[in-house]
Image: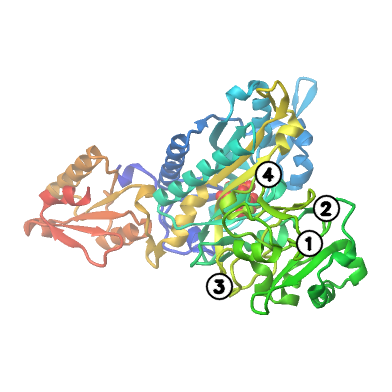
Amino acid sequence: MRWSQTLVPTLKEVPADAEVPSHRLMLRAGLVRQVMAGAYTYLPLGWRAVRKAAEIVREEMEAAGAAELHFPAMSPIELWERSGRREAFGNVLLNFAFPRGDRKVHVALGPTHEEPITDLIKQSIASYKQLPLTLFQIQTKFRNEERPRFGVLRTSEFLMKDAYSFGTDIEQLNASYDAMYAAYCRIFERCGIPYLAVEAESGPIGGDASHEFMIPAENGEDSVVHCEASGYAANLERAETGRTAPQIVVPDDVPPMDAVATPGVSTIEAVCAALGVQPEQTLKTLLYTADAGTDEERTVAVVVRGDHDANEGKIRRAIGAATLSMADEATVRRVTGAPVGFAGPVGLEGVTLLADHDAVTVQPSVVGANSADAHRTNVCCGRDWTVETTHDLRDARAGDPDPKGGGPMKVVRGIEVGHVFKLGTKYSDALGAEYLGEDQKRRSVVMGCYGIGINRIVAGAIETSHDDRGIIWPKAIAPYQCHIIPLDIKDEEVMSLAQRFHDELEAAGVDCLLDDRKERPGVKFADADLIGLPTRITIGKRGLTEGVVEVKRRTDADPEKIAPDAAVARVR
Ligand code: ATP
Ligand code: MG
Ligand code: MG
Ligand code: MG
């Protein structure tokens, strides 16, 4: 492609309203232009990067067994009313009515597509034999964001890859989820962007049911706690704003107060004081506080009854953070004297284990946790108690021990680029998407949803890879691989060599931008650094008389002089 045939309106000045590097650079390098707040046009270079990112996403989705389809952006508002999301989204859901004949058609523009796709599945799936199934699309989404900002990182109209899995049960859901999770890792690796997979708000399924993929970046809007040693990472802001409190379902006929282990009395008092409740009242809330073991290896366990929102951070501080954070299998066995039927650590925050109870068994959850590092545990104390716990990070700070390995955590900022989520039957229940099981019974389809912000891949790459001269593209999503700069465009030898490089490289699959503008070398070099293509070849009259052209990677300080005939091989 010749520069003169495309549109690359680079800017010298930094636009005043652009706060973050990716926004500034996308404007300056002529990748995007704003049409209105929250809506951007992708110019040819920007769109090429988007297309490359989208193609990587598409390839990996297909490799993971997902089939592509394509929905319209609009769908009837009734679907969103039936799912309850018209209300839940509020103003964020763009919707409007338009006349058709003598009636009005009311539609919503999809912020995601759970409703239309669940409706499609309701119409198209009849039997367990057709499941599991994962479908995806790459499509424009609409969200009336309260605060569109940071260029294309948060807009009202954006490109999302959204995938949805449909299965008969939790096992099928888990398998689809794991496949999507693995595909996400490959996608971000291939795109050349750094990422962290972090535990996120779990929603209706609870437990380990949602991960966000975050690009660590100073200007990210999310906060993530991260332990490098163990790899543990979780979204702190989710924890603060959206995390569901541990749900502990205990039958009404609870054991009497005197079942509380005596060594725990002081602990009960400390916990009650921290929570601002009376011990008697606490009996209804805190069933047991057991305190066992030696001082340095104290295991304190707290069971909280019903759907409470006791602040576990407070409890932990009241009794010392380390003691409530974690217990391993050996500790569980020692404290409970019970058989432990799984490997790996059990999050004991909010879980009671009765020191003197003889029928305690701890089992991995049957409802969606993955057993290796279950963060959700069923505790059966001779009766059917279900205890669901999540790591509560609402009060987490830098330096706190991580719930997996106990190493100190860091708090870093991140840009959410992807999100995988076990939905369960929320939408299939609401919209009636059922299948007929092998046993001839009808059940709701078990769903997962998986989103990636395509625009955020591009902006996130720039946010994490640039210098003061411009963008440094990761190879896989660079608009072009090679930038060919003829310095003397009137010189026939220079221009024909530039064209030859262009054609040979294109033929070898290396896409090229040939800067045929009548501009000074300084302008061309500055623009080349700004738009940041991985490799550039400079061809000058003077060099050719010495028998050389210059090849320079965007990351190199100095160009390398090589013979023209060696240039194409060097770039490939
Ligand atoms: P955020 O927390 O940043 O508002 P979200 O959690 O609302 O994002 P999801 O509903 O999980 O977003 O959508 C899936 C993906 O779509 C996100 O991970 C993100 O990459 C992208 N995305 C969401 N909202 C926007 C937006 N307003 N502009 C651009 N991309 C977005
Ligand atoms: Mg959002
Ligand atoms: Mg989010
Ligand atoms: Mg999200």
Density class for disc 3 (Cα within 10 Å; few <14, some 14-19, many ≥20) is some
Density class for disc 4 (Cα within 10 Å; few <14, some 14-19, many ≥20) is some
Q: Are the two marked residues, 1 and 2, in contact with CB atoms closer than 8 angstroms?
A: yes
Q: Nearer the viewer, residue 132 or 198?
A: 132
Q: Are the two marked residues, 3 and 4, in contact with CB atoms closer than 8 angstroms?
A: no
Q: Residue at x 65, y 73 (%)?
A: 322
Name the disc covering residue 250, or none: 2
Density class for disc 2 (Cα within 10 Å; few <14, some 14-19, many ≥20) is some
Q: Nearer the viewer, residue 113 or 340?
A: 340
Name the disc covering residue 367, or none: 4
Q: CA distance from mark 4 to mark 2?
A: 17 Å
Residue situated furthest right in the rendering: 280
Please tell me which of labels 3 and 1 falls first in the chain. Answer: 1
Quadrant the N terminus occupies: top left
Please tell me which of labels 2 and 3 falls first in the chain. Answer: 2
275 lies above or below 461: below
Q: Residue at x 72, y 28 (%)?
A: 443
Specify the amino acid type for callout 1. Val
Please tell me which of labels 3 and 4 falls first in the chain. Answer: 4
Q: CA distance from mark 1 to mark 2?
A: 10 Å
Q: Nearer the viewer, mark 2 or mark 3?
A: 2
Q: Could you say which quadrant of the image residue 312 lies in? A: bottom right
Specify the amino acid type for callout 2. Val
490 lies above or below 25: above
Specify the amino acid type for callout 4. Val
* Pointer 3 residue: 408
* Pointer 1 residue: 303
Q: CA distance from mark 2 to mark 3?
A: 34 Å
